[in-house]
Image (tube, rainbow, N blue to C red):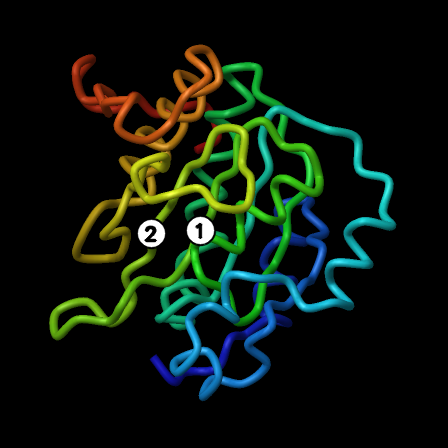
Amino acid sequence: MHAAFDVAGIVADLAGLGITPVEVSSQAHSRRDYLRRPDLGRMLDPASLRMLEGRVIAPRPCAIVIGDGLSPTAVNVHAAGLLRDLLPRLAADGIEVGAVALASGARVALGDEIGAIIGARMLVMLIGERPGLSAPDSLGAYLSHAPRIGLTDAERNCVSNIHGAGLSYAEAAFRISWLVREGLARQVTGIALKDESGAGGSPAALPGV
């Protein structure tokens, strides 16, 4: 929970995927603030807000936010690997990913504010989950259709337990891409979008994945 968020390392990993992320921060500027004031982790700090509002970002069907969350270790270790499997699946479905943001001091809801500012139709938030005794590096993915400030957990889908002894990158990417595709088609996420990705069997490998 107290591990450092390796922003430089993740930026380097994403560069290998051809991604240059936008770097933003919440209003929780220290780990102490983050843990004591969850509300601060749900709001962009003024500098990040001005920067995003001043950028010309063409709206795309999907945007991705990578946030440190309660387990920065999970994001440091797994975010780039998951994206390596996820991006080709989204591309195969004809879903274009626009901005990718790297968010420090992030709670899940911070992604909704970022997604609203950049005009994403679907927001995928990758974030470190609360460390447990068996999984200190568990990554979660939260999906919001038409992201905006004030969304509740009931309006998001979650794919959790992504780590070496849990959900594999391939299986997680399969489930996330299914939810993105169906969420965009049906214009919903959350309790209105039941995860039926397993109905078609196990994920088939894509070329180069």
Rendered position, 13 above or below 36: above
Camera-side residue: 130 or 83? 130
Rendered position, 23 above or below 80: below
Camera-side residue: 28 or 64? 28
Q: Which mark is residue 140?
A: 2
Give the position of the N terminus as an image quadrant: bottom left
Give the position of the C terminus as an image quadrant: top left
* Residue 89 in picture, x, y percent from top left: 46, 25
Circle 2 — which element? Answer: strand
Q: Residue at x 58, y 30 (%)?
A: 62
Circle 1 — which element? Answer: strand
The kind of residue on which mark 2 rests is: Gly
**Left or right of 33 in this view: 94:** right
Residue at the far left in the pictured view:
134
- The residue labelled by disc 1 is 126
Q: Callout 2 environment at 10 Å: few (<14), some (14 to 19), or many (20+)?
A: many
Q: Residue at x 42, y 46 (%)?
A: 82
Q: Residue at x 41, y 64 (%)?
A: 77
* Residue 32 in picture, x, y percent from top left: 45, 88
Label pair 1/2, CB-CB below 8 angstroms: yes
